[in-house]
Amino acid sequence: MDVIAWFVPPNALPDPRRNTRHRGIAKSLLTISLVVSLMYLGVAFVRGTMPFAEHVMFAAGILTPVLGAWLIRATGDISLGLVVTNIGGILVIAVWAFLTGGITSIALPGFLANIALLSTFGNPAILLVMGAILGAALLFLYTATMLSWLPVSMIPNTEMPGLMLTSMLGSVGIVVLAGFVVARDRAQVKTMLRTAQRAAEQSSRAKTVFLTSISNEFRTPLITILELAERLRAEPANTLTKEQLANIGHITNAGRHLLGLVTQVLDMSRIEAGELKLNMEPIHIDQVVPPCLSLVALAAEKKQVSLVDDCSAATDWIVWADRAMVKQALLNLLSNAVKFNRQGGSVTISCQRAGTAYLRISVADTGIGIASDWKNELFEPFSRLGAEAGNFGSTGLSLAISKQLIDKMRGRIGYESTVDIGSTFWIELPLAESSALRG
């Protein structure tokens, strides 16, 4: 019969990590109850007869951890159960000490059980509060002793040595056993976490290999389809009808779009696999901004989106970066600014110093904007930005790729956006002279 399972919340049983954690806490609490029960038997053997109040104190000391374990099972909240148990234990021992000698009472070693319980708190704030309560209880007992507020002790002086030995041994037993249980169960949880981490890493590597392989397999037939479509389009006009030419155009457009999506997946898998190598060098801004603008010019023209280059006058800016990576990241931002813009809107790219060591390149659009709900997911792979607006033509990888590339170059990326007004995405790259000074 698994008694410990009775104190584990039902919803934690299927989860090995949570199950182990709850079982460890339950074992610690039940260990305290068990040791206090043994202390009760030892004290009863030494003294022969005890006042009714001592029986009540021992009963409270035995039941408090058990009730705490049941509270954890009922609520599923470990911190709540430990806090209630700790406060209950401090109260029981403080009352016991008050009745048996105050700050010199044989009950004081019982506070070691509360100290052992404090070690199981993972929340520093709760730990400090519980420590303060324990300190306040000790201060009260000291004050009560010094001001003679104490009643006559229930324990005769002749029985003090044996009872103190029993109390100390029991308290040490609580600390050692509870600590051993907690340490062993935490070790089991760490082992589970390491195993899960290795499994996740293996899964990630397998996913990367799969994506790389399947992306390469897709690219070859796609390129062939595009080449054949271009050959058909190049046939003499009189051999194809207008409808056939239009269909060929659709095939070409769809093929190019699909090829772009496959390329993004391949790029992301290469980044995650660490296959992209940095070639850091000083780069003039006018070597990357105009080429990127020219690449999105056709898409902007089709959507009647005007492109405004406010970086054209800042040709003396030099950043320390990888030229290809900067172009790809900036092109992703410009492409999104055009794609998610309004018909007849505008895209403005600007450059300005960010602090003393960085240059900020901003891409502002007049598009649909981004809801605040996207804040934590925007730069995550496959976040599908714009899907809620009916645009499903994106893998959701362009921003994730841009962030990965900028991070690899020790840069920064961010955005500001207002729904129905527009968005501004920016990247910050180290200035070449600042990088040189840092060595």
Image (tube, rainbow, N blue to C red):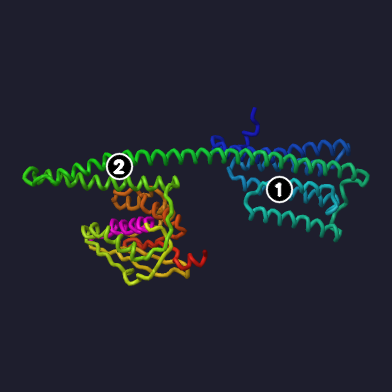
Tally of numbered tags: 2
21 in relation to 299, above or below:
above
User: Circle 1 — which element?
Assistant: helix
Amino acid carrying mark 1 in the image: Gly
User: Circle 2 — which element?
Assistant: helix
Horizontal placement of 168 versus 329: left or right? Answer: right
Q: Which residue is drawn at 64% across and 40% down?
A: 187
Residue 384 x, y percent position in the rendering: 35, 49
Q: Which residue lies furthest to the top in this view?
A: 1
> Chief secondary structure of the magenta span?
helix
Segment colored magenta: 324-343
177 vs 85, nearest the viewer: 177
Amino acid carrying mark 2 in the image: Arg
For the residues carrying marks 1 and 2, which lies nearer the camera in this image? 2
Horizontal placement of 236 versus 344: left or right? Answer: left
Which sits earlier in the primary sequence, circle 1 or circle 2?
1
